[in-house]
Image: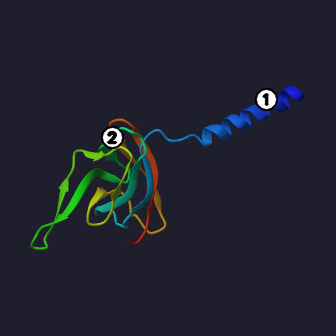
Amino acid sequence: MKTFSFSLLSIFLLLTISACSVNDGVIVQDAWARPGFVGDNSAVYFVLKNPTDSPDNLIGAESDNAVMAEIHLSTMDSEGIMSMERQDLIVIPANSTLEFSPGGLHVMLVSLLKDLSPGDSFPLTLEFQRAGDITFEVEVRQP
Protein backbone atom coordinates (compact mmCIF):
# COMPACT_ATOMS: atom_id res chain seq x y z
CA MET A 1 0.00 0.00 0.00
CA LYS A 2 2.89 2.38 0.80
CA THR A 3 4.43 1.70 -2.60
CA PHE A 4 1.12 2.47 -4.33
CA SER A 5 0.71 5.73 -2.37
CA PHE A 6 4.28 6.73 -3.11
CA SER A 7 3.75 6.02 -6.83
CA LEU A 8 0.59 8.14 -6.90
CA LEU A 9 2.37 10.98 -5.12
CA SER A 10 5.29 10.76 -7.56
CA ILE A 11 2.97 10.88 -10.57
CA PHE A 12 1.07 13.83 -9.09
CA LEU A 13 4.30 15.78 -8.46
CA LEU A 14 5.60 15.01 -11.95
CA LEU A 15 2.35 16.25 -13.54
CA THR A 16 2.39 19.38 -11.38
CA ILE A 17 5.97 20.20 -12.34
CA SER A 18 5.20 19.60 -16.03
CA ALA A 19 2.16 21.88 -15.91
CA CYS A 20 4.28 24.67 -14.42
CA SER A 21 7.16 24.40 -16.86
CA VAL A 22 8.22 27.50 -18.77
CA ASN A 23 7.23 27.65 -22.44
CA ASP A 24 10.34 27.68 -24.60
CA GLY A 25 8.65 29.12 -27.67
CA VAL A 26 6.09 31.62 -28.89
CA ILE A 27 2.99 32.16 -26.71
CA VAL A 28 -0.40 33.19 -28.15
CA GLN A 29 -2.74 35.25 -25.95
CA ASP A 30 -6.08 37.07 -26.12
CA ALA A 31 -7.25 35.55 -29.42
CA TRP A 32 -10.56 36.79 -30.83
CA ALA A 33 -12.32 37.00 -34.19
CA ARG A 34 -14.98 39.17 -35.76
CA PRO A 35 -18.40 37.58 -36.38
CA GLY A 36 -19.16 36.55 -39.96
CA PHE A 37 -21.46 34.54 -42.20
CA VAL A 38 -20.80 31.62 -44.53
CA GLY A 39 -19.03 32.86 -47.67
CA ASP A 40 -17.93 36.13 -46.04
CA ASN A 41 -14.52 36.93 -44.59
CA SER A 42 -13.54 37.47 -40.97
CA ALA A 43 -10.35 38.49 -39.17
CA VAL A 44 -8.55 37.03 -36.16
CA TYR A 45 -6.54 39.13 -33.71
CA PHE A 46 -4.19 38.08 -30.88
CA VAL A 47 -0.95 38.86 -29.09
CA LEU A 48 2.25 36.92 -29.78
CA LYS A 49 4.92 36.79 -27.08
CA ASN A 50 8.39 35.47 -27.80
CA PRO A 51 10.11 35.02 -24.43
CA THR A 52 13.14 33.33 -26.00
CA ASP A 53 16.52 34.76 -26.87
CA SER A 54 15.98 33.91 -30.57
CA PRO A 55 13.64 35.51 -33.10
CA ASP A 56 10.99 33.35 -34.77
CA ASN A 57 9.07 33.77 -38.01
CA LEU A 58 5.32 33.37 -38.45
CA ILE A 59 5.00 31.75 -41.87
CA GLY A 60 1.41 30.56 -42.12
CA ALA A 61 -2.05 30.07 -40.65
CA GLU A 62 -4.73 27.41 -41.02
CA SER A 63 -8.38 27.12 -40.03
CA ASP A 64 -11.05 24.51 -40.71
CA ASN A 65 -13.62 27.34 -40.61
CA ALA A 66 -12.49 29.01 -43.86
CA VAL A 67 -11.40 28.12 -47.37
CA MET A 68 -8.13 29.93 -46.65
CA ALA A 69 -6.36 31.63 -43.73
CA GLU A 70 -3.82 34.30 -44.66
CA ILE A 71 -1.64 36.69 -42.69
CA HIS A 72 -2.44 40.28 -43.69
CA LEU A 73 -1.28 43.79 -42.86
CA SER A 74 -3.69 46.72 -43.14
CA THR A 75 -2.18 50.14 -43.70
CA MET A 76 -3.47 53.65 -44.37
CA ASP A 77 -1.81 55.91 -46.92
CA SER A 78 -1.34 59.67 -46.65
CA GLU A 79 -4.76 60.25 -48.26
CA GLY A 80 -6.55 58.14 -45.66
CA ILE A 81 -7.14 55.16 -47.96
CA MET A 82 -6.88 51.75 -46.27
CA SER A 83 -5.27 48.83 -48.07
CA MET A 84 -4.50 45.27 -47.11
CA GLU A 85 -1.51 43.19 -48.17
CA ARG A 86 -0.81 39.50 -47.69
CA GLN A 87 2.33 38.79 -45.66
CA ASP A 88 4.43 35.67 -46.28
CA LEU A 89 6.57 36.12 -43.18
CA ILE A 90 6.24 38.06 -39.93
CA VAL A 91 9.31 38.30 -37.69
CA ILE A 92 8.69 38.00 -33.96
CA PRO A 93 11.87 39.42 -32.42
CA ALA A 94 13.52 37.75 -29.42
CA ASN A 95 12.14 38.77 -26.01
CA SER A 96 9.31 40.77 -27.54
CA THR A 97 5.56 41.10 -27.93
CA LEU A 98 3.76 41.62 -31.24
CA GLU A 99 0.07 42.56 -31.39
CA PHE A 100 -2.28 41.56 -34.20
CA SER A 101 -5.08 44.15 -34.00
CA PRO A 102 -7.74 45.90 -36.11
CA GLY A 103 -6.12 48.25 -38.59
CA GLY A 104 -2.82 46.35 -38.52
CA LEU A 105 -1.66 42.76 -38.61
CA HIS A 106 -4.35 40.05 -38.58
CA VAL A 107 -5.17 36.59 -39.88
CA MET A 108 -7.82 36.88 -42.61
CA LEU A 109 -10.28 34.00 -42.77
CA VAL A 110 -11.23 33.94 -46.44
CA SER A 111 -14.66 32.58 -47.41
CA LEU A 112 -16.03 31.23 -44.13
CA LEU A 113 -17.34 27.67 -44.22
CA LYS A 114 -19.68 28.25 -41.26
CA ASP A 115 -21.17 31.23 -39.46
CA LEU A 116 -19.15 32.80 -36.66
CA SER A 117 -21.46 34.23 -33.99
CA PRO A 118 -20.49 36.05 -30.79
CA GLY A 119 -19.80 33.51 -28.07
CA ASP A 120 -18.61 30.82 -30.51
CA SER A 121 -15.05 29.57 -30.42
CA PHE A 122 -12.91 27.63 -32.87
CA PRO A 123 -9.30 26.43 -33.24
CA LEU A 124 -6.73 28.29 -35.31
CA THR A 125 -3.24 27.03 -36.10
CA LEU A 126 -0.26 29.30 -36.64
CA GLU A 127 2.92 27.95 -38.23
CA PHE A 128 6.29 29.21 -37.00
CA GLN A 129 9.74 28.37 -38.35
CA ARG A 130 11.20 27.60 -34.90
CA ALA A 131 8.21 26.93 -32.63
CA GLY A 132 6.38 24.79 -35.22
CA ASP A 133 2.59 24.65 -35.27
CA ILE A 134 0.69 26.24 -32.39
CA THR A 135 -3.07 25.57 -32.21
CA PHE A 136 -5.24 27.67 -29.89
CA GLU A 137 -8.89 28.61 -29.33
CA VAL A 138 -10.29 31.81 -30.81
CA GLU A 139 -13.35 33.47 -29.25
CA VAL A 140 -15.82 35.19 -31.59
CA ARG A 141 -16.88 38.61 -30.31
CA GLN A 142 -18.00 42.03 -31.45
CA PRO A 143 -15.14 44.52 -31.83
User: Disc 2 residue type?
Assistant: Pro
Judged left or right of residue 6, residue 62 is left
Find out whether the residues at labels 1 and 2 contact each other: C-beta distance under 8 Å.
no
Of helix, strand and loop, which one carries label 2? loop
Q: Residue placed farthest to the left in the image?
A: 79
Residue at the spot of label 1:
7
Q: Which mark is residue 55?
A: 2
Q: Is residue 73 above or below residue 142?
A: above
Image point 40% across, 64% down: which residue?
A: 116
Please indicate whether residue 133 sits to the left or right of residue 82 in the image.
right
Residue at 89% from the left image edge and 28% from the top image edge: 2
Instruction: Please identify the quadrant where the N terminus is shown.
Output: top right
Q: Which mark is residue 64?
A: none
Q: Which residue is outermost to the right?
A: 1
- Placement of 7 over or under 20, stated as above or below: above
Mark 2: few/some/many CA within 10 Å (<14, 14-19, 20+): some
35, above or below 127, in the image: below
- C-alpha gap between disc 1 and disc 2: 41 Å
Task: State the image quarter where residue 115 is shown.
Answer: bottom left
Tell me the SS state at disc 1. helix
Residue 96 location, x and y as percent? 37, 50
